[in-house]
Amino acid sequence: MSRWAAWLTVALISSSCHRQAIPEPLDPRLSTETAVEPSSGIPPKPIDPATSGTARSATPRERAAVDALIRAAEAVRLLRLREPVKIEIEDGDAIANSLHSQIEEAELERARLLYGALGLLDAEADLRSMFADVLGEQVIGYYDPDTERLVIRDDVMAGLIGAFGPDQAREARLVLVHEIVHALQDQRLGLGESYKKERSADEDNAFRSIIEGDATLAMVAYALRQQGIPLSAATAGIQQMGELLDLNALVRGEKLDDAPAIVRVTLVAPYLRGLQFAAAVQGRGGWAAVNNAHRRPPSTSEQVLHPEKYFAREKAERIEVADNEALLEAGFRRIEEDTLGELELSVFLGQTRPSGTDEQAAAGWAGDRLVIYTRGDEAAVIWWTTWDTEADAEEAFDAAREVLTGDPSARAERKNRSVLIVKGLPPKLHRAVRSDFSSFARRIKDQPAPPSLPPDLIY
């Protein structure tokens, strides 16, 4: 590992910047009023300190320490706050209880249905407790754009003002630079309004990656500045680190370690992959280019994972899955559909791997649409995917077939550069589903795949 890679690993571990996001499987479409993503401007409801921990205003000394850090964050990020940010100090119980109260039953049921049907979550598990435990273990604060509050956990604030020594003070400063950047994003780049837009699961993963990647890159820039190192000396290294920096392995926590891969990966990806994406954008055009990426964010997780595709504006193929008459006649009802994208496909295709992901098999993704049908307690998945090339499709098909082996309700099929994934459907209905897919695959074959990128756009 290079000196730079080793240094960044230490910086990211000590920053605790990863301890702040609700995983996407629970929260792909929540509005600003109901969501609880603390590091991305999604506020929890007001808490009752008498029953949910303690909350207080910052002391003058604490306010002065945060103000000094705000000035440093502004200088690094080349943005200035338009208005002061309110500061509130809460203990761990207050933050954890607030988050717990915001996990809505409807979103739990959606996660249970969609990811349970795919085999990525245990549909019988207590998802509320699982998500609450993961969040309670990870969250250290959040920024609320509605009230312009920066909420800081009490032990982090104590570290900032030097109560635990210089090492803890440095760590607290890194943590809070990340959060202050979210305030800058809100006041200068419209973060709060952006969160109100409806997005698919894939679009949401991509959007959160620019939000968290930007804040994490600014945190790294702040740490580098303390050592007299310009960010320009590091952006290329961040992009090229690849397997040298696996934040999924670095982010530790008993509850997080025990969580399913779909939770761990979608929790971590906006920080690690978002950091690499933001570094690619910043390296090309400075912080002004990052600002523009907020106004025109990546539309797919593929664009985040492969920034050259963002620069080339390579869009996903639009896929519409029509209702299958045979399923309807058999009593199945279509109740949900979504686009999961390359990131979440890597988790589905990686279920047989120790890492829980198969990024290689998911690469080459061109588009997907997943539909959930239910009949009583049964849930069935019909998933159409397209790929850049037939070779990419074959690799995805092989991985899907391995995942589905031994499940009589499941099937994977490839035609040309399209792959069908079926799960939870009685075998007697497979033929009707395959017929619809075959017609779709023939049409896709006659359409050009996303164009190959010029060599100068490929890292």
Image: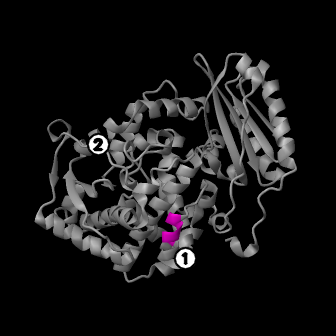
Q: Which residue is mark 1?
A: 283
Q: Would you say 241 lies left or right of 427 here?
A: left
On the image, the x and y values in percent for residue 92 come to: 24, 46
Mark 2 → mark 1, Cα distance in angstroms: 38 Å
On the image, the x and y values in percent for residue 317 come to: 72, 51
Considering the numbered disc 2 on the image, is that residue within a helix, a strand or a loop? Answer: loop
Q: Is residue 362 above or below residue 148?
A: above
Q: Is residue 89 above or below residue 84?
A: above
377 or 158: which is nearer to us?
A: 377
Q: What quarter of the picture does the C terminus occupy?
A: bottom right
Task: Say whether residue 415 is visible.
Answer: no
Q: Amino acid at mark 1?
A: Gly
Q: Amino acid at mark 2?
A: Lys
195 or 424: which is nearer to us?
A: 195
Task: Say whether residue 241 is visible.
Answer: yes
On the image, the x and y values in percent for residue 257 come to: 45, 43
* Circle on res. 45: 2
Q: How many marks?
A: 2
The magenta stretch spans residue 17: no
User: The magenta stretch spans which residues?
Assistant: 290-295
Image quadrant where residue 161 sits = bottom left
> Within 10 Å of the Cα at label 1, are there few (<14), some (14-19), or many (20+) other Cα atoms?
some
Q: Would you say 409 lies left or right of 122 here?
A: right
For the point 16% across and 45% down, the residue is 54
On the image, the x and y values in percent for residue 297 come to: 55, 61
Q: Name the N-terminal-most of marks 2 and 1.
A: 2
> Within 10 Å of the Cα at label 2, are there few (<14), some (14-19), or many (20+) other Cα atoms?
some
